[in-house]
Image (cartoon, rainbow, N blue to C red):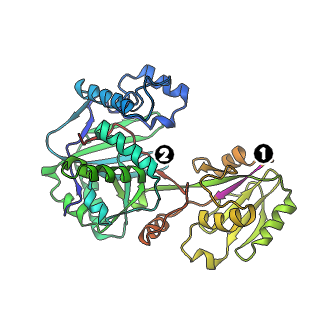
Amino acid sequence: MTWFNPFRILVPSKDKPHLVASRSYVSYGKAELQDKLDRNPYSYLHVINPAGTGKAPVKRGSEAFYGLVRERFESFVAKGWLTADDEPSFAIYRQASEHHTCTGVVGILNVDGIRQGRLKLHEQTLEKREKLFAKYLDTVGCHAEPVLCMYPDGDAQGTDAATWMEAWTVAHRPDMDFSTTDRIRHTVWLVRAGESSDLEPLLNAIPAMYLADGHHRIASSLRLAEKYPDAPSKQHVLAYAVPASQLAIRPYHRVLRHPGWDVARWEEAFDTVSDCLSWQRIEAGTPAPSSVGHVHVHTAEQSWALAWNKGLQTAGAVDADLLQEHLFQRIFGISDARNDPRLKYAPGTLDSAGLKAEYAGQPEQALFELHSVTPEQLMQTADRGGFLPPKSTWIEPKLRSGLFIHEIQ
């Protein structure tokens, strides 16, 4: 069975990719979102957020609201702002910033391959969100943003696929090449099915891929496929696959509302879990944790470095797991990390100094600064059928909506 396939890909017209492709609408502040909607009629935000920044004429998340999304999508196609060849294609997509570059391939995954375990997962999903997204897909009739997958670099077939794609990008002019205001360059090469006869078997020979981002979209697509078993277009999921080493995985840090402890009380608390960790005071300007197994704690008065005992580190748990089990639960009685109001999460998009300035300066809260989960830890967790704790990874690249679209109507 071929499970990673080319497809009839809808992309922005040649003169508009920089105008059409958008970030997720929830990533914009209200004023920025309104500015985008007012000043750029081509933005895919007009499709995914048809109500603008005001009150929606129908309830957001309802079938009627999704019907508006479908109408806007059809309007973009009718106006020629989204176009497609009749011949199926892969898309080689490169995203480059001053910090990070990755090159991978956009195609569609067959849901049978997902059910057979060829796509390994590491996050649990919520049934309510699965059903909501399935209803969205059923009404809107397209995938407008790929899920993000990775494959091991050491796998021979994956290495050969990456080598093939690199050679193609050198030998061919891109079909799209533009930069966005967040200083990211987006470059796309469309590879028609007749030209990808060597690439497709390499991709399909990769024993397994790992889902980095998009667990609810996968779960909802599986629900939709089960609802329409005789609809071939609904048996696939839009995906972007990259070598694991090209992902940028940043941590999610923990911010704890604490009871106003002084330095001595914090150190007494650390001593109560000395069976699990060692600790020492550190200077305020100490860099972020340099490896897994280490956590820095910052309050307005003092900072500490915690190191897990080696027996815990070899048990396969990531730092967020150990922090939850041995500090938050044992010391603070926090049993539900997802919903306890004393915990919030800070994505690792700020450097250490920025984090401390943002979260550790207030006397009523403490910042727990983590090292990022490694690709190896993510893959090991998925291989054993486990799940990372909530808010464990901030993974880049973040993919834009409207740049690659797979119709499932």
Question: What residue is shown at x 35% (from left), y 31% (from top)?
Answer: 69
Q: Residue at label 1?
A: 362
Q: Amino acid at mark 2?
A: Glu
The outermost residue toward the left is: 194
Q: Which residues are magenta?
A: 365-369
Compared to 116, does 129 lie above or below? above
303 in the magenta segment = no
**Is 123 displayed left or right of 84 in the figure?**
right
Residue 347 position, x and y percent, is: 58, 49
Q: Position of residue 275 (x, y in %)?
A: 73, 77
Query: In the drawing, does residue 316 fall left or right of residue 201?
Result: right
Quick one: label 2, few (<14), some, or many (20+) residues within 10 Å? Answer: few
Taking the image as shown, residue 56 lies to the left or right of residue 268, namely left
Q: Secondary structure at mark 2?
A: loop
> Can you tell which of label 2 and label 1 is closer to the viewer?
1
- The answer to whether any part of residue 291 appears in the image is no
* Image quarter of the N terminus: bottom left
Magenta: main secondary structure: strand
Up the image or down, 339 lies above or below 321; here it is above
Whether residue 336 is visible here, answered yes or no, is yes
Residue 136: image quadrant is top left
Spatial separation of the CA atoms under disc 2 and disc 1: 33 Å
The C terminus - image quarter: top left
Q: Earlier in the sequence, mark 2 or mark 1?
A: 2
Q: Which residue is mark 2?
A: 98
Q: Residue at x 62, y 63 (%)?
A: 290
- Kind of element beneath mark 1: loop
**Could you tell me which residue is drawn at 67 percent across and 63 percent down?**
295
**Residue 324 image position (x, y, % from top left):** 64, 63
